[in-house]
Amino acid sequence: MFESCPKVNRMCAFCTKDTYNPMTKKYDGVEKLFCGVSTGFDTRVEGLEECWLKMTKSQRTTWAKKKNIEYQTRLQSGGFK
Ligand SMILES: [Zn+2]
């Protein structure tokens, strides 16, 4: 909570640092920034086009679809191992 968010260049109440990697479903020891208000399986800030709170409903839908495709592709190529 309250990490410096690169999308808005200031402290953000929803950003959290964690070492969890959603693409492998493992804690890989690398610190990443997660957005607490975004929804989906991969809520890393770096994957967002901009701050979730600034995104329009259609941007959010497009993003969620893109992430869902990534998720399905991941599953089909052997899953989260
Ligand atoms: Zn943020």
Image: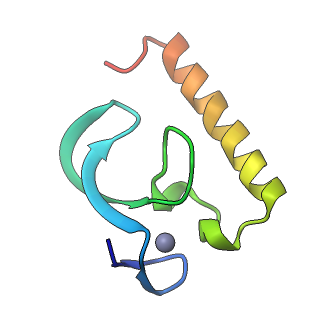
| Colour scheme employed for the rendering of this structure | rainbow
Residue 34, image quadrant = bottom left
Say which of 39 and 76 sits in front: 39
- Taking the spot 42% from the left edge, 76% from the top edge, the residue there is 13
As drawn, which residue projects farthest toward the left? 29
- In the picture, the quarter occupied by the N terminus is bottom left
- Taking the spot 60% from the left edge, 71% from the top edge, the residue there is 51
Mark yes or no: residue 50 visible.
no
As drawn, which residue projects farthest toward the right? 58
Relative placement, left or right, of 62 versus 49 is: right
Picture coordinates of residue 64, whole percent (x, y): 67, 43
Relative placement, left or right, of 37 versus 62 is: left
Q: How many marks?
A: 0
Residue 72, image quadrant = top right
- Taking the spot 69% from the left edge, 74% from the top edge, the residue there is 54
Say which of 74 and 56 sits in front: 56
Mark yes or no: residue 38 visible.
yes
- In the picture, the quarter occupied by the C terminus is top left
Residue 14, image quadrant = bottom left
Picture coordinates of residue 12, whole percent (x, y): 44, 79
- Taking the spot 55% from the left edge, 27% from the top edge, the residue there is 71
Picture coordinates of residue 18, whole percent (x, y): 26, 55
12 above or below 20?
below
Picture coordinates of residue 16, whole percent (x, y): 33, 64
Relative placement, left or right, of 66 versus 24 is: right
Say which of 7 and 40 sits in front: 40
